[in-house]
Amino acid sequence: MAERNGPSSIKVGFRKSLFYFFTMASLMFFLSWFFVMQSTYRPNPMEYNLIPNSKHLSTLDDSKYQIRKQNVESSFGNRKLVKDDGGKCHQNDELVVKVYMYDLPPEFHFGLLNWKPGGSSVWPDVRNNIPGYPGGLNLQHSIEFWLTLDILASEFPQAPKARTVIRVQNSSEADIIYVPFFSSLSYNRYSKGKKNEKKNGNKILQEKLVKHLTTQEQWKRSGGKDHLILAHHPNSMLDARMKLWPATFILSDFGRYPPNIANVEKDVIAPYKHLIPSYLNDNSTFDSRPTLLYFQGAIYRKDVWPSCSLIYWLFWPFFVGGLARQELFYLLKNEKDVHFSFGSIQKDGIKKATEGMRASKFCLNIAGDTPSSNRLFDAIASHCVPVIISDAIELPYEDVIDYSEFCIFVRTVDAIKENFLINFIRGISKEEWTRMWNKLKEIEHFFEFHFPSKENDAVQMIWQAVARKVPAIRLKLNQHGRFFRSPPSTDKGLKSIPSPRNFW
């Protein structure tokens, strides 16, 4: 009997030891990650939460392009962006924010589009020849392209009156310092290195950028606090962000950023550029859209941690978001009026998605590898009421737009309950859907990209979101410069006592 129990007891002991080792390793990984975050930044604990939360601060009323909100007046220099009691957003001057843009070499921006300068200028003459931007999935993260074009266009003598940005040549006059690095395009084009390459082209460009920026007087003067950096693709700037984090980032979400590097208080969330064409002359009705609920995309998430991992249980809301696609597929695949299938943009994927969304009442937007996806903006362009199942999502311009007026939000933990989601969606009346459908048509222009930019289009809305960060940036700069003219401390011991609000 002892001989039979011997190997069994050894196996049990081995399993216990393996589980103990794995748990301790996970714990050490988490603690090391936490202390790295703590050592890189000490934010105000009253200002920054561990997990940023969305805040619905206003609601859209029934008038086109109006915002129902109490008087809010944000001042930038001599220019003001005003939202009045009647609800309309308007400017009492043509300009909102002054931008100083670095003249970086073309390899950081339009050179990535195979553009070559013909003279001494590092910028193309966008009045006559705009370099083409690659299509497909590249387009969804093309924000860097549109914003840079808008800055260049602001220098035209005949620039449109309805503007939100102007380029200045003296950085001391600027509200923000713009870094024209097409980081998303750099990732898409150069992140996959060639054989025998120690570093890929994307990493090399990021290293060059960090070296260049940190030697500039503008960066040294502010520590980067007044700089604006675009990193819209979730994997762009992965190598440089830890060194450039004092700057304001323009991102698609915070899914792959620790909260001390990027958060809703410091940074700007920008929309994806939708891939599906805008639905012009949409005369559809509740009854003319036969599909109740639509989803087409990747069903199985790429990076799923094992459920036995301590990391999984510490950050389970993020992982549950990704697993929700699988769970919902099994719950909904047999519903007759639900389309839930795998799909991509390959071949005629865009055409099929366009037809599917335009024929659907509701479109699912479920967290995947990151909290956000382009699917939400495709749904808005299709006037298909979005059903958002992504607990950690942050949304563009949410400080002035109430997405609950035209989107349905469902907590992940509820959505994956049997019959919960389908019964909830079936319970939404024709009248309620029609109201949200009309609202989608009213607000869709906020998510359209144009060159030249148009009043309150996506380009101008992003600049307005940046402008709303300017007062906080100025506060940081003024605090940073308090002792600039003071004599150096003669105390060789403790040079300063940290302020409670800067202590974490």
Image (tube, rainbow, N blue to C red):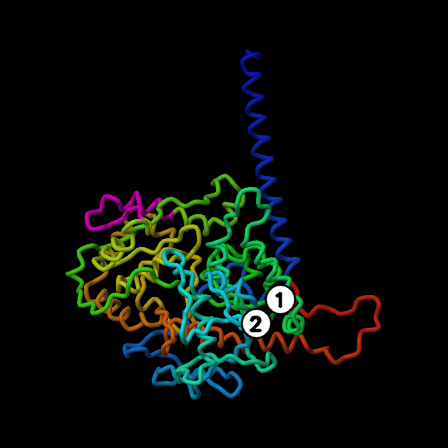
Q: Height in image: 266 above or below 275?
A: below
Q: Is residue 498 left or right of residue 469?
A: right
2 or 1: tag closer to the N-terminus: 2
SS at mark 1 in the image = helix
Q: Is residue 347 above or below residue 461?
A: above
Q: What quarter of the picture does the N terminus occupy?
A: top right
Residue drawn at 37 percent across, 63 percent down: 273
Q: CA distance from mark 2 to mark 1?
A: 9 Å
Q: Residue at x 40, y 74 (%)?
A: 128
Query: For the residue marked with disc 2, what is the amino acid?
Result: Tyr
Q: Magenta residues?
A: 324-343
As for residue 32 lying within the magenta part, the answer is: no
Residue 29 falls left or right of residue 123:
right
Residue occupying the far left of the picture = 287
Task: Give the position of the C terminus as an image quadrant.
Answer: bottom right
The image's mark for residue 102 is 2
Which residue is located at x 41 percent, y 82 percent? 159
Q: Is residue 332 magenta?
A: yes
User: Which of 453 and 311 lies nearest the eye of the viewer?
Assistant: 453
The x, y position of residue 155, in whole percent, is: 47, 81
Q: Quadrant of residue 486?
A: bottom right
Mark 2 Cα shell of 10 Å, populated few (<14), some (14-19), many (≥20):
some
Outermost residue to the front: 118
- Mark 1 is surrounded, within 10 Å at the Cα level, by few (under 14), some (14 to 19) or many (20 or more) other residues, namely some
At label 1, which amino acid type do we have?
Leu
How many numbered callouts? 2
In percent of width and height, residue 463 lies at: 45, 74
Q: Is residue 447 above or below residue 50?
A: below
Q: Is residue 438 left or right of residue 100?
A: left
Q: Are marks 2 and 1 in contact (CB under 8 Å)?
A: yes
Q: Which mark is residue 213?
A: 1
